[in-house]
Amino acid sequence: MSLTKRKIALAVAARTRMTQQMAFNAVQATLDVIVEELSKGGHIELRGFGVFEIVTQKPRVGRNPNNPTQEVKIPARKVVKFRAGRKLAENVRKLKV
């Protein structure tokens, strides 16, 4: 099951006194702030949940899947990394396999 932005907004509205539209706007604004901060190279720390940060992947050599003998240079690039917080990691560990 996927948890969509709409489902998150509905859950927020149900747990607070916000209307569904207010909750949707709050969720959207939160996501906008996260995107803006990460786009500036910052990091987001949400205690008990996790940390979003920008990391640089080193350049590496890959292989062309259509021609495995052909090497392809993959340049360095910036990517978003998420590290789960302690509370989230503990809850995930408790899930049945």
Image (tube, grey):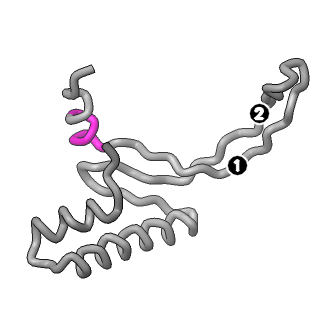
Identify which residue, 33 or 18, lies in the foreground: 18
Q: Kindly identify which residue carries mark 2.
A: 60
Q: Is residue 46 left or right of residue 38?
A: left
Query: How many badges with numbers are in the image?
Result: 2
The 10 Å Cα crowd at callout 2, few under 14, some 14 to 19, many 20 or more, is: few
Q: Is residue 66 left or right of residue 10?
A: right
Identify which residue, 35 or 3, lies in the foreground: 3
Q: Secondary structure at mark 2?
A: strand
Residue 90 in the image: x percent, y percent?
Answer: 22, 33
Residue 19 in the image: x percent, y percent?
Answer: 17, 80
**Which amino acid type corresponds to the residue marked 2 in the rendered image?**
Arg
Q: Is residue 74 left or right of residue 89?
A: right
Q: Residue at x 41, y 60 (%)?
A: 44
Examine the rendering and report whether any part of residue 41 can be seen. yes
Q: Is residue 88 above or below residue 18?
A: above
- Magenta stretch secondary structure, dominant: helix
Q: Quadrant of residue 84?
A: top left
Q: Is residue 15 magenta?
A: no
Q: Quadrant of residue 41?
A: bottom right
The 10 Å Cα crowd at callout 1, few under 14, some 14 to 19, many 20 or more, is: few
Q: Residue at x 79, y 26 (%)?
A: 65
Q: Quadrant of residue 25?
A: bottom left
Q: Which residues are magenta?
A: 85-90
Q: Is residue 65 above or below residue 53?
A: above
Q: Is residue 86 magenta?
A: yes
Q: Kindly identify which residue carries mark 1.
A: 77
Quadrant in the picture for the N terminus = top left
